[in-house]
Amino acid sequence: MSSDPAQARLRTGSEENRRARSRRLVERGRERVPKSIHFVTYTLKYNRMDWITVDALGEHWKKGRVDAVTGDDGAMSIKTENIAALTIDAPALANRRKPIKLTIDGQSLELAPGPGNAQRAAR
């Protein structure tokens, strides 16, 4: 270790920065249910991220991609590449009191109110 005071200040400063950043992250917390998901997989071995599960790929070992976003009104928009089937298990779908608009790859449908938290979509 160096006995140079400037080096000691640099180490101390970066340690203080790290601790301050850690405190900010702890205060903010993590998003339990993310409003958007950007997921890429090449195999069904790794087929799940948060509230999206890829059930079938168009072609295995080719890039499969899901970009899903929920709006403040509960509407969901999902864009996919090389995905043949997926399951949506979002809290927004559970015990809904009003219809929810769902758009997958430009095709829109409206989910009726009622219980149920998983919806499966296949081509």
Image (cartoon, rainbow, N blue to C red):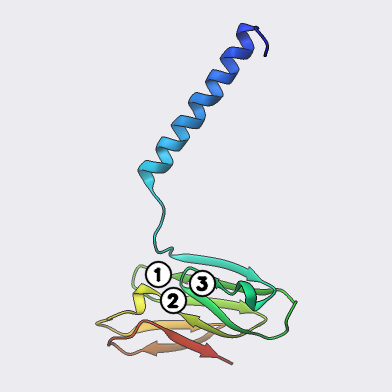
Q: CB atoms at circles 3 and 2 under 8 Å apart?
A: yes
What mark, if any, has residue 76 been given in the picture?
A: 2
Q: Residues within 10 Å of mark 1 (few under 14, many from 20)?
A: few
Q: Which residue is mark 3?
A: 68
Q: CA distance from mark 3 to mark 1?
A: 10 Å
Disc 3 residue type? Ala
What mark, if any, has residue 71 been given in the picture?
A: 1
Of residues 55 and 114, the one nearer the viewer is 55
At mark 2, the secondary structure is strand
Q: Of tags 3 and 1, which is closer to the observer?
A: 3
Eyeballing the image, is 67 above or below 21?
below
Q: CB atoms at circles 1 and 2 under 8 Å apart?
A: yes
> Where residue 44 sits in the image (x, y, percent)?
64, 78
Q: Earlier in the sequence, mark 1 or mark 2?
A: 1
Say left or right for 107 vs 45: left
Of residues 114 and 100, the one nearer the viewer is 114
At mark 3, the secondary structure is strand
Eyeballing the image, is 16 above or below 101?
above
At mark 1, the secondary structure is loop
Disc 1 residue type? Gly
> Where does the C terminus fall, quadrant-wise?
bottom right
> Where residue 78 sits in the image (x, y, percent)?
52, 77
Disc 2 residue type? Met
Residue at position x 46%, y 72% from top?
Answer: 51
Q: CB atoms at circles 3 and 1 under 8 Å apart?
A: no
Can you name the residue that lies furthest to the right here? 61
Residue at position x 50%, y 75% from top?
Answer: 52
